[in-house]
């Protein structure tokens, strides 16, 4: 399957008062139609920045970009602002983290849902409104016609997020980008939203990029997972592979940090320390200061390359899991 | 070297906090740009003049020499002379003291009163809050200058009525800012923690609440000082502030007005002194605000309006 | 929404009563006999007795307060101790001049601040932004009476274009009114405009940083649409507040400017009354201004409710 949306050696740099910061450091990933890619990392790992920058939502001075961000083969960064905006509006749908603040409090739901399709699809107001009602029904909003006239503050958080999802789908996008969409919601609603997006994907066949810091969220849902740390991908694999054989020490740390049912007396493991300052990245492997293994002398001075340790499974580490020693199958 | 499966005890060097969170963001803010340094320098200059102005001025403040009256700026009289032959340059220098003094004293009074009211209102809530804030609202319901004028009207012109009037008018700014800060701080966990170990209210106020509202208060102080100078000058311009024989910048404009446009130097130079001092204070206040709390919208600025 | 407005109105009323009490108490601070001081050299024992009796100055304090408040409620603010005229009428006679100056100044302020503030925010860090910030910093630091003098020196003494003072009612002669109002309106308007520019700039920047602006851009809307429907619309909420406060300040009598330009408005009335020790006039003027201030704030609240549905549908 060829990738519909992909990043190729993508870098984002920002100049700060105290020196340049490398926020995204050479990232490659792609997602195909009907596929779900989860990008997992802590805050500051560059996971949101990479996607937002790639689609033109980060202003370019002060940030600087290198590499390519391709939609359907076309490099978005090489386009002028207007074309990029058109592609973004027409082909990419966004769902953001905070449903409370992501909607304009002064405009009705209906107005906010129809403004993009009226511009990009060149359809009339009433046609757009009809479509909006359809999508609202699809995402499970009761009494959608009434809701069209409502204001965001009149809806609950979960409902607002559903509206955001419906809004993102108004122009029939081929790619859906969800940036921590369930972080601000309670667990039950989280599960509902996840379920909803999965069903929508099955129905419409979009490529989905799901950005999150919570590995557990993507276990059922994602096809592939890319783990990011300090602006780089440190591990990439199919979901099943990743959970079965996490190869990078950071991934292992993330997995073991989750509480498990049935093990009530086990002390929760944490990864001590904090992620590095993007202005002062350590030489060598970025994770080295926090790594519990440090198995290889090269870790301190050399950045491990992202190498394929099993079919479709890449990891950026010198540490070798027992089961993989001896080379790739 | 390969490791066993289990993790080894990691050696973790904690990252130093980034340089941005310097120990004294205030001082850092002051040295941030050349403009701010210049402004701070000017303030120091004015303070110095306030202290030693009388000693270093070339002429006395009331050295009358009618033969020399109404001279335009020249080499012996840098800013010219007024209708009584007094050297305007010397008067401008000497007048720094009363302006500075009125501003500092009145703002200090406003600060003490306002912060106290704000602390009590924010911390204790309930009726204390209602009474405190409603009375602040009452004062706030008058334009700055009007209330100052009314107070001076009742007490008669002079330096102390002016100080009192300015103090009363600026108290609500401090009260509101303090109260707002206290309300945000009050809900913080460390306050609840302190309470749970039995710390008394005074102790909590002193050790926990006060340091955290300092930032807002400091910014408000520098801005208030600026506008206090403007208010005092305005009152003096109306003849109601500092009275002769003490010279004051505003009063010099009051006197000079009658001699426009010919003896323009009588009004232009003292006015420039006011302007530059206020500008310097505002620049410094702005720099501090940007460093400490960029979102602190200045209520005092919005109401500076028209004195 | 009605409930919200009602609540605000009641609050305002409470504050107004408080203000009236404050104003009343101020009179008590006056050393000596207020009537005698006001009459000054035109002292006349019979008139003196009448005025004192009318003002009820011999009654106990709390009775005086009640009397004052109940009179004020129906618009009776007593008479001037100087010339016996009704304070209310004196004040009302000055309103047209004050209002025309306030409106002219506000127009100037808005014409300056809106474009400058918005462009400054949109082109943040560039030349126009720096210029606007420097300019507005100067504008809020300059003493209004000094600025007025400078303008007079420029336009009257040097260019001989405009009169230095005086007033001609708009209804009488619009051109002359304009010629007379420009300098005072500029003086006030430039300063007011500087305040507004800074505020509009920061309100726009803040609104632009909000999540909903990001959502609007993510939807690929044109930048002009994003600014108009999302960023600026939300920024209007705080902007209107400040504009309202400005207008209230302006209406409250720009005392210093009115004195400088001999503009016969409320501010000058108050000033003259202060000099003449005409305390009832001072009281009445101050109280009326406070009332105007509060009404202006209420109007701002009304506009808030009209713009922001969160307040409307509470």
Image (cartoon, rainbow, N blue to C red):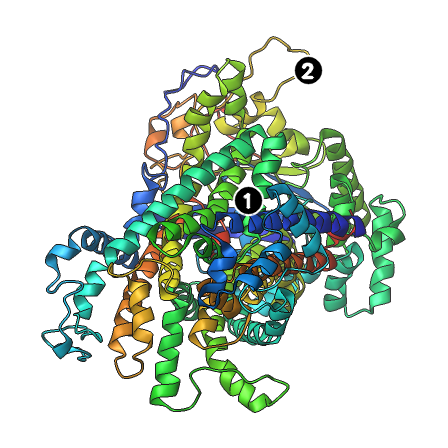
Task: Tell me the element at label 2.
Answer: loop
Chain letter of disc 1 in the image: B
Q: Judge whether C90 appears above or below B96 on screen.
A: below
Q: Secondary structure at mark 1?
A: helix
Horizontal side, residue B248 vs residue A196: left or right: left
Would you place residue C277 above or below residue A297 in this image? Answer: below
Q: Nearer the viewer, residue B154 or C300?
A: B154
Which numbered marker is on residue B136?
Answer: 1
CA gap, disc 2 to disc 1?
Answer: 57 Å
- Quadrant of the rendered image containing residue C241: bottom right
Q: Which residue is nearer to you in this view: B228 or C21?
A: C21
Depth check: A58 or A27 in front? A58
For residue B245, the mark is none
Give the labeled residue for mark 2. Answer: A261
Q: Alpha-carbon neighbours of circle 2 within 10 Å: few (<14), some, or many (≥20)?
A: few
Asked if residue A21 shows in the view, the reply is: no
Residues at discs 2 and 1 in contact (Cβ within 8 Å): no
Task: Please give the name of the residue rendered at 85% of the width and 47% of the height, measured from the top-left corner.
Answer: A138
The N terminus of chain B lies in which quarter of the figure? top left
Give residue B90's position: percent from left, percent from top: 17, 65
Chain designation of label 2: A
- Give the farthest residue toward the front: C46
Residue at 49 percent of width and 39 percent of height: B178
């Amino acid at each position: 399957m060829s990738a519909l949306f992909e990043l190729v050696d993508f870098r984002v740099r920002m100049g700060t008062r105290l020196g340049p910061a490398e926020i995204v450091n050479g990232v490659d990933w792609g997602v195909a139609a009907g596929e779900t890619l989860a990008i997992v990392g802590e805050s500051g790992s560059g996971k949101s920045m990479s996607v937002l920058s790639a689609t033109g939502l980060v202003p370019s001075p002060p940030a600087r970009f290198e590499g390519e961000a391709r939609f359907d083969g076309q490099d978005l960064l090489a386009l002028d602002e207007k074309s990029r905006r058109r592609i973004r509006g027409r082909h990419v749908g966004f769902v953001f983290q905070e449903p409370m603040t992501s909607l304009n409090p002064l405009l009705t739901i209906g107005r906010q849902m129809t403004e993009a399709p009226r511009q990009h699809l060149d359809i009339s107001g009433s046609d757009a409104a009809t479509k909006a009602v359809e999508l609202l029904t699809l995402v499970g909003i009761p009494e959608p016609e009434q809701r069209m006239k409502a204001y965001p503050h009149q809806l609950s958080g979960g409902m607002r997020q559903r509206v955001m999802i419906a809004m993102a789908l108004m122009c029939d996008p081929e790619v859906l980008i969800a940036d921590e969409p369930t972080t601000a919601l309670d667990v039950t609603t989280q599960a509902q939203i996840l379920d909803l997006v999965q069903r929508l994907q099955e129905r419409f066949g979009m490529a989905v990029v799901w950005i999150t810091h919570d590995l557990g969220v993507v276990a059922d849902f994602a096809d592939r997972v890319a783990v990011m740390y300090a602006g780089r991908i440190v591990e990439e694999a199919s979901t099943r592979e990743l959970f079965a054989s996490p190869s990078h020490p950071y991934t292992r740390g993330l997995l073991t940090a989750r509480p498990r049912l049935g093990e009530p007396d086990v002390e929760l493991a944490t990864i001590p320390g904090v992620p590095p300052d993007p202005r002062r990245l350590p030489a060598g492997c970025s994770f080295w200061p926090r790594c519990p293994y440090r198995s290889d002398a090269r870790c301190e001075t050399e950045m491990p390359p992202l190498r394929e340790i099993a079919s479709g499974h890449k990891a950026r580490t010198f540490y070798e899991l027992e089961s993989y020693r001896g080379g790739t199958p | 070297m390969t490791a066993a499966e289990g993790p080894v005890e990691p050696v973790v060097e904690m990252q130093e906090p980034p340089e941005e969170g310097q120990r004294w963001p205030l001082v850092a803010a002051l040295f941030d740009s050349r403009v701010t340094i210049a402004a701070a320098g000017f303030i120091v200059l004015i303070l110095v003049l306030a202290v030693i102005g009388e000693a270093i001025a070339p002429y006395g403040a009331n050295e009358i020499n009618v033969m020399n009256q109404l001279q335009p700026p020249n080499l012996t009289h840098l800013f010219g002379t007024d209708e009584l032959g007094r050297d305007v340059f010397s008067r401008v220098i000497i007048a720094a003291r009363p302006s500075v003094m009125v501003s500092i004293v009145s703002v200090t009074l406003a600060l003490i009163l306002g912060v106290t009211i704000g602390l009590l209102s924010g911390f204790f809530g309930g009726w204390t809050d209602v009474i405190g804030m409603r009375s602040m609202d009452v004062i706030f319901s008058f334009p700055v200058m009007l209330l100052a004028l009314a107070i001076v009207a009742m007490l008669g012109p002079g330096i102390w009525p002016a100080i009192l009037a300015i103090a009363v008018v600026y108290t609500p700014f401090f009260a509101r800012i303090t109260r707002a800060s206290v309300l945000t701080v009050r809900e913080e966990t460390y306050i609840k923690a302190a309470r749970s170990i039995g710390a008394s209210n005074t102790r909590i106020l002193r050790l926990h609440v006060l340091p955290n509202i300092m930032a807002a208060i400091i910014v408000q102080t520098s801005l208030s000082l600026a506008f206090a100078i403007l208010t005092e000058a305005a009152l003096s311009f109306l003849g109601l502030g500092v009275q002769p024989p003490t010279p004051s910048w505003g009063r010099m404009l009051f006197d000079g007005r009658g001699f426009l446009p010919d003896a323009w130097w009588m009004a232009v130079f003292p006015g420039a002194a006011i302007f530059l001092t206020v500008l310097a204070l505002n620049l410094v206040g702005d720099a501090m605000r940007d460093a400490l709390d960029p979102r602190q919208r200045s209520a005092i600025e919005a109401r500076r309006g028209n004195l | 929404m009605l409930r919200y407005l009602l609540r605000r109105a009641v609050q305002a009323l409470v504050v107004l009563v408080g203000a009236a009490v404050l104003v009343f108490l101020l009179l008590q601070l006056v050393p000596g006999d207020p009537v005698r001081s006001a009459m000054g050299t035109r002292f006349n024992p019979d008139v003196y007795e009448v005025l004192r009796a009318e003002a009820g100055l011999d009654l106990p304090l709390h009775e005086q307060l009640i009397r004052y408040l109940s009179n004020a409620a129906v618009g009776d603010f007593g008479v001037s101790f100087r010339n016996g005229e009704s304070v209310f009428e004196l004040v009302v006679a000055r309103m047209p001049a004050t209002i025309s100056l306030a409106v002219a100044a506000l127009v100037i302020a808005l014409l300056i601040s809106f474009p400058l503030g918005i462009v400054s925010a949109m082109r943040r860090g560039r030349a126009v932004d720096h210029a606007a910030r420097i300019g507005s910093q100067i504008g809020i630091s300059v003493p209004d009476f000094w600025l007025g003098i400078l303008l007079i020196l420029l336009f009257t003494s040097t260019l001989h274009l405009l009169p230095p003072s005086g007033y001609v009612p708009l209804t009488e002669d619009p051109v002359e009114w304009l010629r007379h109002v420009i300098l005072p309106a500029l003086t006030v308007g430039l300063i007011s405009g500087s305040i507004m520019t800074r505020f509009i700039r920061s309100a726009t920047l803040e609104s632009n940083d909000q999540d909903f602006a990001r959502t609007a851009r993510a939807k690929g809307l044109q930048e002009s649409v994003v600014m108009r429907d999302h960023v600026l619309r939300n920024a209007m909420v705080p902007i209107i507040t400040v504009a309202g406060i400005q207008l209230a300040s302006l209406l409250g009598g720009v005392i210093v400017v009115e004195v400088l330009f001999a503009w016969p408005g409320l501010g000058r009335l108050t000033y003259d009354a202060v000099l003449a020790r005409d305390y009832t006039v001072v009281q009445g003027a101050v109280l009326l201004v406070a009332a105007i201030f509060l009404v202006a704030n209420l109007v701002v609240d009304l506009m808030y409710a009209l713009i922001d549905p969160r307040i409307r549908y509470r």
